[in-house]
Amino acid sequence: MGEAEYSELANSMMLGDEAGMLKLLFNPHTRKLLGMHAMGQRATEIIHIGQAVLFYGGSVEYFRDIVFNYATLAEAYKVAALDGLNKL
């Protein structure tokens, strides 16, 4: 499991919306994505990214390896993926 708090993201700071978070749930052995939680005012703007990776059977490593535009809320996926992988 990896988490990213909105307060860690530059875009959230610029928007003045630092209350929220993204959590990625993945199998620690296979690293396959099992689900995600997005909470906060703009959660609907980013949840579809995780849904697409989940639908295609992707792994948490996808979020680690892909380049996300900076500063966007989607950057939370990379932050959460790195957090989760660092816990293994």
Image: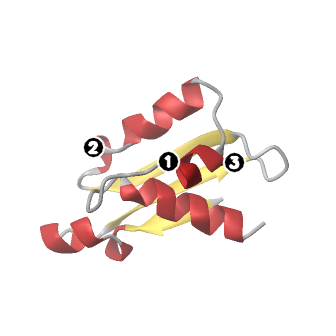
- Residue at (64% x, 49% y) in the render: 61
Cα distance in 3D space between marks 3 and 1: 17 Å
Three-letter amino acid code of the residue under disc 3: Phe
The kind of residue on which mark 2 rests is: Glu
Where, by quadrant of the figure, is residue 22 drawn? bottom left
**Is 81 placed left or right of 44 in the picture?**
right
**Labelled disc at residue 45:** 2
At label 3, counting other C-alpha atoms closer than 10 Å, the crowd grade (few under 14, some 14-19, many 20 or more) is many
Q: Residues within 10 Å of mark 1 (few under 14, many from 20)?
A: few
The residue tagged with tag 3: helix, strand or loop?
strand
| Colour approach in the figure | secondary structure
Residue at 53% x, 61% y: name it. 80
Mark 1 or 2: in front is 1
Reading the image, the residue beneath label 3 is 26
Q: What is the three-letter code of the residue carrying label 1?
A: Ile
Mark 1 secondary-structure assignment: loop
Residue 8 at x, y percent in the picture = 37, 75
Q: Quadrant of the N terminus?
A: bottom right
Residue at (33%, 75%) from the top-left corner?
7
CA gap, disc 3 to disc 2? 21 Å
Secondary structure, mark 2, is: helix
Which label belongs to residue 66?
Answer: 1
